[in-house]
Amino acid sequence: MTNRPTLQSKRDVALAYYGLVNKCTHPRNRMQSLSTVYYILDFNPYSRSLSYHRHHRHPLDFPLRKTKPTLHSSPQDHVIMPASELHHTPPPTTATNHSSSAAAEDDSWIWAHIKAEARRDAESEPALASYLYSTILSHSSLERSLSFHLGNKLCSSTLLSTLLYDLFLDAFTSDPSLRSAAVADLRAARERDPACLSYSHCLLNYKGFLACQAQRVAHRLWQQSRQPLALALHSRIADVFAVDIHPAARIGKGVLFDHATGVVVGETAVIGNNVSILHHVTLGGTGKVGRDRHPKIGDGVLIGAGATVLGNVKIGEGAKIGAGSVVLIDVPPRTTAVGNPARLVGGKEKPSKHEDVPGESMDHTSFISEWSDYII
């Protein structure tokens, strides 16, 4: 029978792996190696005071715990939830008169859930342990984790990840609306997309979510008259995520860019709250018209894959645009427009109206039964 690894053997493994750290010339590789050392030692660098860190600079100087925490334990220096709480359930509702307090509580609940999911995945899939530790588990807040992840995703040989990390972190920490929008977008993906396995899955892997958060930071830079940096960030977002959203475009919260590949949003476009947009959607202009020339998308709108909306037209609240449609004129609220050129289901005079919010229900085909021209 093989004996369980002892504390000393764990330290030996960590020492051997730590030897790789000094051999790594690229900062990202060094961070990954150091994160693996931390994971082996089960050390959280954010769990102790700064005074403690000053006296323990070497990662192998930190004391080891005799047992490794699991999802069913809850040591004070880790945010861990029981496995039974990892299912998708809403956070507890509390009566409060302060919306900021409620938003902060919601942020904390989401972040605790993300860390619990990441720890579960790290234990079940050791190959991802270093990645999950460096991206999620080693960070003290959602904004730090998101800033680190975006910085690594969007960096290049001349646009360093450390610079981007500071840029994103400054934006997220100084503007509470960016944090609340990110949380709302995480909820939108988890609730509307059946393929979204967890909040951490969305945070790490959903390029539509990541592109949207990065665009919001670029938009903030644009408003601060820092157009060159905003446009440089916009270019990196388009290169990395294949999502082209102009920094000047305004995006609400609770927005889902599902799949997101090929999405194009013009400079003067406006996207409302709780909107769902699928891949290869274009919100563009009609030519070389200047000034306000792009679509205005109301709250709760659903735009199907491959749809094109051109010009300064208004898509009313709760409207639905069918996949592949080409929209050139306004669409009334709660109606469905399909085809090329798009027509209103039920006719222009008395269009059929729906009661649900398609941007949240993701119902793409309810209009088929009322469309007599649909024949196979």
Image (cartoon, grey):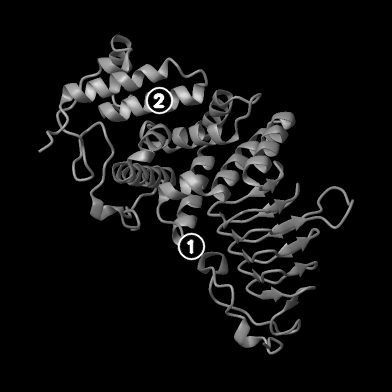
Front-most of residues 353 and 306 = 306
Tell me where residue 6 appears, x and y as whole percent.
15, 27
Give amino acid for label 1.
Arg
Instruction: Quote the CA–CA distance across marks 1 and 2.
Output: 36 Å
Q: Residue at x 26, y 42 (%)?
A: 80
As displayed, is residue 353 above or below residue 208?
below
Check contact, mark 1 vs mark 2: CB within 8 A.
Answer: no
Q: Which residue is identified by label 1? A: 192
Q: Is residue 332 left or right of residue 89?
A: right
Q: Is residue 288 left or right of residue 73?
A: right
Mark earlier in primary sequence (1, 2)? 2
Q: Is residue 18 visible?
A: yes
Tell me where residue 91 appears, x and y as whole percent.
33, 53
Q: Residue at x 45, y 16 (%)?
A: 23
As displayed, is residue 301 above or below residue 287?
below
Q: Is residue 122 left or right of residue 249?
A: left
Q: Residue at x 37, y 31 (%)?
A: 138
Q: Quadrant of residue 235?
A: top right
In what quadrant of the picture does the N terminus appear?
top left
Tell me where residue 360 appears, x and y as whole percent.
52, 65
Q: Quadrant of residue 53?
A: top left
Assign a secondary structure to mark 1. helix
Q: Which residue is identified by label 2? A: 33
Front-most of residues 129 and 176 = 129
Assign a secondary structure to mark 2. helix
Tell me where residue 231 appears, x and y as whole percent.
72, 35
